Amino acid sequence: MPDPQDFELQAYQGREKPSEAPRLLEEALDETYPGPSADPGAAEAADGVTRRKKRNTARLVWDSKPKKAPNPRNLAFQIAEVVLPNPGERGPLLPLEPGTQEVDTSNCNRLIWGDNLLVMQALLAQGYEGKINLIYIDPPFDSKADYSHSVQLTPDESGKGGGELTSEMSALERLAYRDTWEDGSDSYLDMLLPRLHFAKRLLSERGSLFVHSDWHMNSLIRLLLDEVFGFGGHINEIAWCYSIGGKGESRFARKHDTIYLYSHNENIQFDGRGRNVVKPRKLNSHMRLKVDETGREYQEKTDTKTGKIYKYYVDDGKIPEDYWTDIEQLNWEDRERVGYDTQKPEKLIARIIESTTSPGDLVADFFCGSGTTAAVAEKLGRRWIASDLGKAALQVTRNRLVRLGTAGSGGIAFQRSDGRMRCSPFVVENLGNYQRQLLYLSDTRLRQVGPLVLTLFGATPHPSERNLGTQAFNDPETGRFQRRLVLVGDPDRPLSARRVAEAVKLLNTLDGGGYTKLVALGWDFELNFDSALEKALGTEGHARVEARVVPTDIIEHLKKIPEGAGPEDREVERLRGKVAFFEKPWLGVPSIQSHGWVEREDQRMLRVTVRLTRYLLRSVPAGLKGFEKLSEAEKREWLRLAGGADGLSLIDFWSLDEDLGGEDGKRPFTSTWQDLRGLGKRVRRVVTETEIYYAPRPGRKLGLRLVDVFGNDAAWSGLLPES
């Protein structure tokens, strides 16, 4: 196995600079243009040899167009969480590997966080080629659109407070967005072309690809689809017409989107008679309206040439044409709304899914956004894979799936053959590590990152200790000269309490000692980091550690640091002003109380209450609009008011795993209980205390995970009482 530090993934967006003149596609065009010939299907070359002319050679050409699609890569998915939305319901169990409690993800519904190009590459390497029955994608198609998202604050118990903030895209999303649009339509096509190639490979022989677009890019997308699938792969160009939105005054109002349907050939799986597919039959004046003996209305017409009588029952509806006027865009007050701007109506996706798949088929959406495709697939009894690059999209989708079937959740009804009315279990996965993806996409090698991060933080990399730096300064509060060590974690793994504890020992020994504090910079921190660190160092030792989070947007600045530059370099100082290392969020140890034994499900169990105590977000997250000019003191005061006295009003959802690791220690974090504050503008403070029941055994552990309204996550784990 090669060392992970030496592994380099070439980003597909990486390309040569555009040539001065457009280049022709060698595989599509002859070297010489054929002149007249007696045979209209042949051309005589300069050497006198008659060759057949090529057909259908038209291609979309742009300067940076790649010559071939990338190959699949065997990238590892990491399970972040197994979600049991309604564990009290009898229903399908998670598929487990034989003889263990490890989850078999190939038979699970999957929600994946990562760049969809890498996700599709990894799925192909895992054996998904030709296995997906339907792929629906709704890629961004407006270079001037604002893809920031709203953050709804939680009102207090009296209903006061709340409000809405706007948060910019994460660094990972910004980098992908910049790659998508920095060269206009050229870079957009660079982004889309390999994804269409991979989608074609993932589709089953009779599978369908639906690509959603609008007037901005639909003409180019159509040409690209023709090139990838061939002219025989085009099935439909659907106009989805709606009326909600602005009105046109200087032009006709743009009131339709275009949805392209492509497949390997014309023999696609299709059923236009489903409940969610048919449209109401319009009562045409040229057809007679009658009533049969059972009271059903029908229309009848007679073919004047053949005398054949055609009968159409009104309540059967009709197969829609390729212009859809019977499904309206969502309005802002619709119960179905989840607070995601690009959300599509469930009725639209239901028509797409039901017309081209059967129950049990596999559906995928690689730009899942608000999670509509996954939600509808779940309600219609299809298996699904959904992925997105945005943390906000994953958070909204996860919570939406958990709430399916609850009062006020909106959308279409559950229509499953197994009768289930709630979401079945699914897994939330990361594709490797998202910081590592960022480094791949920006072409920055892992081994270079540590010294660069230390330099941007203002530390001098130590000559003999890897990922360790030193700082010397006059303390602004005491005026005393201080020296401290700065440790930076690796970007492709969580920073562990053990690694930090080892570095703390160097405070008194390295370079003769005399270091007063260790600053631990982590891209991510291991589960239960704070309590594990206090256990290793004690309260006094823990106080000598200051944990801070490396911001992901730092990667946009790393390549700008001049080679060999130190902390005092002018360019480094300029960049340092753009980077903020925020203190790590802190989760207080929950209160766990045993209330004795009870009989439950014919088993003697222990009843225990778990109560959240405190959550502390020390810094306002980067990217919140309107906070740029506030002082640090003003930001801290805002956080105090928004979070309440205990900070728990900032929690979006929290979940428990009452048997963390399972008996063999291999079971991933499994949400066996959870509470979330809601979706969109319909939010309330999460409950902060719950009961759990379990059969004790030595070493049984409780896991707790929470995510706040800004996407920060924190976790805790500890032993459960045995009596």
Image (tube, rainbow, N blue to C red):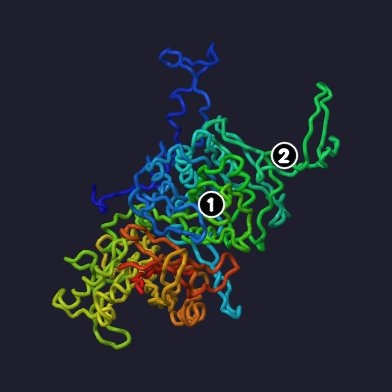
Label 2: state its secondary structure: loop
Q: Residue 374 carries which label?
A: 1
What's the CA distance linking mark 1 and mark 2? 26 Å
Q: Is residue 419 left or right of residue 570?
A: right
Q: Position of residue 262 (x, y in %)?
A: 56, 37
Q: Which residue is drawn at 63% across and 63% down?
A: 408
Q: What residue type is labelled 2?
A: Lys
Q: In this view, does 496 lie to the left or right of 249?
A: left
Residue 571 visible within the image: no
Q: Which amino acid does label 1 sit on?
A: Ala
Q: Where is residue 136 in the image (x, y as percent from the top left)?
A: 54, 45
Quarter of the view holding residue 247:
bottom right
Residue 138 vertical position relative to residue 458 in the rendered view, above or below: above
Q: Where is residue 51 in the image (x, y as percent from the top left)?
A: 46, 16
Residue 301 vertical position relative to residue 391 in the rendered view, above or below: above
Q: Earlier in the sequence, mark 1 or mark 2?
A: 2
Q: Where is residue 1 in the image (x, y as percent from the top left)?
A: 23, 47
Q: Residue under circle 2?
A: 318
Q: Residue at x 30, y 67 (%)?
A: 699
